[in-house]
Amino acid sequence: MSRGLFITFEGIDGAGKSSHIALLADALRSAGREVVLTREPGGTPLAEKLRELLLHEPMDALTEVLLAFAARRDHLRQVIGPALAKGQVVLCDRFTDATFAYQGAGRGFDGEVLSYMELLVQTGIGLNGDLMLSPDVTLWFDLPPMVAAARLADARAPDRFESEPLAFFSRVAQGYADRAAQAPQRIARIDAALEREQVAAQVLAAVAARGWLGAGPHG
Ligand code: TYD
């Protein structure tokens, strides 16, 4: 089955994913791949509207879950599925692991319900047919919540999640760690506490190790 690559980026707010997504996009393009950069919630006109609501309107955890998955469904159908079908590389800033970490671990929402919704929303998308579409690899930027909070302190006006206390981010961080332990093949841990160059090197190494930068067996 000829299919593109689906790479997602995760971590608590302040972990510093953004600049590394752009660097990886450059590296993949240099290796001759077509790259689509996108984000969640968001990536389509509908999903960007849902993002606005999720980040700024008061709501309970179930409503957060419903909006996140509604946005994801539209994003998968309109952007991610078609790009993968064309053989492109999709780099997505956050995906379902964020729902498990933020709504699951952070808000205490039922993980079994999340797993069911994950299956429902990620099935029936393009080339994957009846199989659940999941990322080929997830780069998890792991950073102690205290360090992330210090980095966020200088940032622009915080949204609903960024305004949460340290205890919330400790739960979210634990949620990511648990998720990584359950899917060690898919989720690659990036030590985001290191210097920027070293973080970038880890990102490239994780992708190169899978043969996706042209040097490996499947390049
Ligand atoms: P983020 O990706 O950090 O964007 P920015 O860099 O512009 O702040 O913001 C998205 C926020 O949405 C982040 O705090 C995590 C949250 N979120 C969820 O709570 N659940 C989800 O399923 C997703 C995808 C994101």
Image: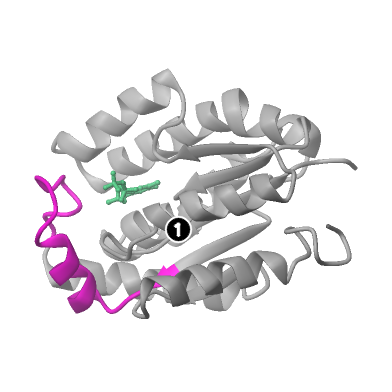
Residue at 54%, 53% (x, y): give it.
8
**At which x and y percent is residue 113?**
47, 52
Location of residue 52 by image quarter: top left
Is residue 36 depicted above or below 22 in this figure? above
**At which x and y percent is residue 196?**
38, 71
Task: From the viewer's side, name the closer residue of 111 and 33.
Answer: 33
Residue at 37%, 80% (x, y): give it.
194
Residue at 57%, 72% (x, y): give it.
188
Going by the image, does 93 lie left or right of 90?
left
Q: Which colouring convention does the figure follow? A: one colour
Location of residue 55 by image quarter: top left
**Stretch of the chain drawn in magenta:** 141-164
Is residue 71 depicted above or below 91 in this figure? above
Q: Is residue 27 magenta?
A: no
Going by the image, does 144 lie left or right of 113?
left
Residue 134 is at least partly visible in this image: no
Location of residue 193 by image quarter: bottom left
- Assign the N terminus to one quadrant of the image: top right
The secondary structure type at the circle numbered 1 is helix
Q: Is residue 148 magenta?
A: yes
> Dot 1, how many residues are within 10 Å of its Cα: few (below 14), some (14-19), or many (20+)?
some
Going by the image, does 115 lie left or right of 111?
right
- Assign the C terminus to one quadrant of the image: bottom right
**At which x and y percent is residue 59?**
18, 39
- The residue that label 1 is drawn on is 20
